[in-house]
Image: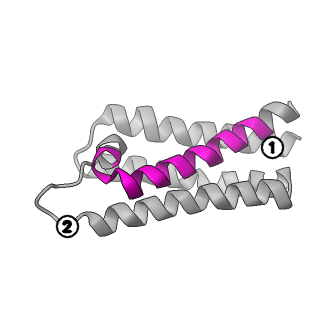
């Protein structure tokens, strides 16, 4: 179980880094994948940059906690971070995004993050 807990945590942290990179360097496709595409006529640059920095920072913080503070600290971090995809789901739904994306991506992500937290608490 220890290997599974650590592997899932590292994969989720690296995925956050990937999402951050994508929002910073491929903002249009990243926003569309998020479920609320950026309007081509609007100034979405700030929104996309903030989203990229937020996600990337979560990835770095998670990896640092896992490496330097251990599984219990990472578990608490994952528990808190699970709120992010839940609120992302609400944002997508409130702004006319696809229910499939809201539930299939954001809600499922929150569940996987909570599973990661549970596994880390069990280690």
Report the side of 76 relative to 41 (left or right). Answer: right
- Residue occupying the point 54% across, 58% down: 56
Report the side of 40 relative to 93 (left or right). Answer: left
Give whichever of 40, 96 is nearer the camera: 40
Q: Position of residue 14 (x, y in %)?
A: 62, 46
Q: Position of residue 30 (x, y in %)?
A: 35, 47
Q: Which mark is residue 120?
A: 1
- Residue occupying the point 10% across, 60% down: 41
Identify the residue under disc 2: 43
The span shown in magenta is 6-30
Sort mark 2 into few (<14), some (14-19) or many (20+) by Cα contacts within 10 Å.
few
Q: Is residue 55 above or below residue 43?
A: above
Q: Position of residue 57 (x, y in %)?
A: 58, 63
Dot 1 lies on which element? helix
Give whichever of 27, 36 is nearer the camera: 27
- Closest to the camera, between mark 2 and mark 1, is 2
Report the side of 78 relative to 28 (left or right). Answer: right
Q: Marks 2 and 1, how far apart in space?
A: 40 Å
Report the side of 122 relative to 51 (left or right). Answer: right
- Residue occupying the point 38% across, 50% down: 90
The way the protein has been coloured in the rendering is one colour
Q: Main secondary structure of the magenta part?
A: helix
Q: Quadrant of residue 69?
A: bottom right
Q: Quadrant of the C terminus?
A: top right
Q: Are marks 2 and 1 in contact (CB under 8 Å)?
A: no
- Residue occupying the point 29% across, 44% down: 32
Whether residue 99 is in magenta: the answer is no
Q: Position of residue 27 (x, y in %)?
A: 32, 53
């Amino acid at each position: 179980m220890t290997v599974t807990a650590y592997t899932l945590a590292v994969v989720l942290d690296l995925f956050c880094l990937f999402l951050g990179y994508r929002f910073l360097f491929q903002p249009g496709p990243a926003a569309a994948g998020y479920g609320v595409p950026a309007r081509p006529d609007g100034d979405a640059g700030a929104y996309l940059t903030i989203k990229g920095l937020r996600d990337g920072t979560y990835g770095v913080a998670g990896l640092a906690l896992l490496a330097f503070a251990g599984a219990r600290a990472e578990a608490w971090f994952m528990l808190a971070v699970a709120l992010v995809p839940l609120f992302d789901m609400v944002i997508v739904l409130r702004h006319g995004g696809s229910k499939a994306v809201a539930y299939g991506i954001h809600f499922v992500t929150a569940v996987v993050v909570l599973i990661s937290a549970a596994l880390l608490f069990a280690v």
